Amino acid sequence: MKATTLPEYTRAAVVREFGQPLVLEEVAVPQTVEPGGLLVEIVACSLCGTDVHCWEGELAIKVELPLILGHEMVGRIIAIGDGADVDSAGQPLRIGDRILWTHSFCGRCAMCARKRPTLCRNKIPYGQDTMTQWPHLLGGLAQHSYVLPGSGRLKVPAGVPDDLASMASCALRSVVNAVEQAGRVGPEHTVVIQGAGPLGILATGLFAQAGAGRVITIGAPDNRLEIATAFGAHEVISLKTHPDPKDRLAMVLDATGGLGADLVAEFSGHPAAFAEGVDMAGPDGRYLLVGQLGAGVTEVAPGTITKKNLSVIGSFSGDLSHYRTALTILERFAGVLPFDRLISGHYPLTDLDAVMKRMQSFQEIKPVLLPQEVLS
């Protein structure tokens, strides 16, 4: 094992009871790293809506407490296990390099065999797995984290800043996967984006750059719609100005000559958006679902899907290829898409509880926690 001097303990944001204030605790740091593993110092961890749902206990995925929250992070290597000195793209790794890493996949279940590792039956997810077992440090809202041997890892290019690299490790790679699964869009297509959070805004940019003839982004508050316009939205529809779903549907139909959108992409996370999106989709259209990870339910008339010959596509997370593409997009579109406008603030870990509440009230878009700046 190659390593710098390792700390005995690290500070981490631990969830011991859903919805209760997050507490910074001292957690033991592994003093050895197994073959294929890495130990990193977290340099940035951005917050995701899923983190809020996880903290609230509202995820549709089973979560066992206690856990260290945070799954959208970038780390700097401080210890390298045997055989882990090369990343998943063949680039050499050294102490001090910054990396992104995937959830840990087993590589031997039915889903892994089908090359669908995001659906791995034995997946160990960062930020959602219990800290009761070694190596304990499996969340990004901590000063240190452990990278399991089953996790793919990629070296972060020198030109990509910490906060954007962190965002790439969940938000952007999820959108990359979703855009890929949606299929081709071209100048003849109208794309409607439901949601103006980080994912919806990023999707606005990627669909616009992919050549969609018209991109319409629906969401709130208005400052987020302004950013969506900067990312390439041709039109925006404000939930504040148009709170009635019937009005929003009428606007989409008017913009598409009464047909409806060729592709509707849901990034809002609100269950009620599902029925609305089905109505907005045109004949032989596509409906892409990405934001629905909560436990909420809604009603929809299934006959609408049948009569429209509608394709409904679920897109979950992203695999190593999507992390890699996300980093490439940050490099190549840096002067085209204003990624930095999504970063709403930088905070020490001691501010986490207040930042989570600001996330709940939509005062933050993509806040970034800087664990190395935690106050002693």
Image (cartoon, rainbow, N blue to C red):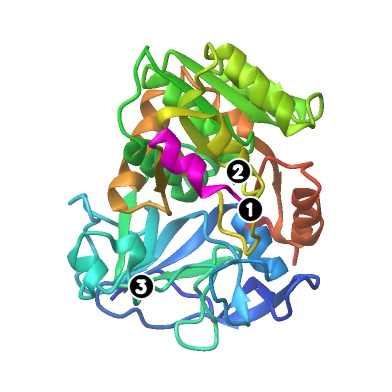
**Dot 3 amino acid type:** Leu
| Quarter the C terminus occupies | bottom right
- Identify residue for label 1: 299
Decide: few, some or many residues near mark 3? Use Cα within 10 Å; few <14, some 14-19, many ≥20.
many
* Front residue of this view, candidates 291 and 375: 291
Q: Looking at the rendered structure, which numbered label has been put on residue 189?
A: none
The relative height of residue 101 versus residue 324 in the rendered view (above or below) is below
**Of helix, strand and loop, which mostly describes the magenta segment?**
helix
Which of labels 3 and 1 is toward the front?
A: 1
The relative height of residue 218 versus residue 113 in the rendered view (above or below) is above
**Dot 1 amino acid type:** Glu
Residue drawn at the location 62% of the way across and 33% of the way down: 342
Residue 276: quadrant of the picture: top right
Residue drawn at the location 53% of the way across and 11% of the way down: 257
Q: Looking at the rendered structure, which numbered label has been put on residue 148?
A: 3
- Identify residue for label 2: 275
Q: Position of residue 61 (x, y in %)?
A: 53, 70
Residue drawn at the location 64% of the way across and 28% of the way down: 218
**Dot 2 amino acid type:** Ala
**Helix, strand or loop at mark 1:** loop
